[in-house]
Amino acid sequence: MSKQGSKEERELVNKLWDAGFAAMRAPASGGATKRPLPDVLAGNGSLYLAIEVKSTRLEHIYIDNEKIENLIKFSEIFNAKPYIGAKFIRKPWRFIKLEDLHITRNKNYRVNLDLAFSKGLDFDEVIEVSTQTKLL
């Protein structure tokens, strides 16, 4: 993982701690193990989150099918809510539910700015502090 991605993961972990969650970066995420680990794992005793973190300076993010399958597998075992944590540089965090991801021709996944900000949740929504009404 790039230094930029690690920086974004640390930022998210700190935000989660500040919001009352225990949170950690999975030490072997990103292909260092065959286990299906998310980038960030967090919980507060009633809500558990498994987050695959992606950051970019561009307007779109691509995610390999295997990463999504592993996130689903881990989340089912751990009983966590799976999200893609998208950090478009100089924009606020967005959290995308897996069913809202765009599937590419190669059976991988894509998130762009429009999808992230139309269907994605903000930080308070993902930690279930507030909910916004999404216009579809």
Image (cartoon, rainbow, N blue to C red):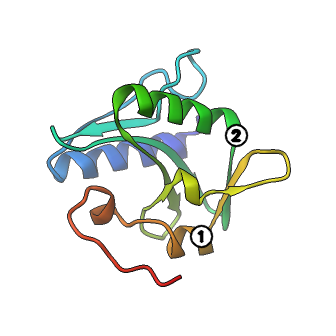
Circle number at residue 64: 2
Number of numbered discs visible in the structure rendering: 2
Q: Is residue 35 above or below residue 51?
A: above
Q: Is residue 70 above or below residue 65?
A: above
Give amino acid for label 1: Leu
Real-space Cα separation, disc 2 to disc 1, in angstroms: 17 Å
Q: Position of residue 35 (x, y in %)?
A: 53, 17
Q: Earlier in the sequence, mark 2 or mark 1?
A: 2
Left or right, 62 with reference to 118 = right
- In which quarter of the view is residue 66 placed? top right
Are there few (<14), some (14-19), or many (20+) residues within 10 Å of tag 1?
some
Circle number at residue 115: 1
* Quadrant including the N terminus: top right
Q: Position of residue 32 (x, y in %)?
A: 57, 18
Identify the residue at horizontal 35%, vertical 28% (top origin).
78
Identify the residue at horizontal 42%, vertical 68% (top origin).
92
- In which quarter of the view is residue 63 placed? top right
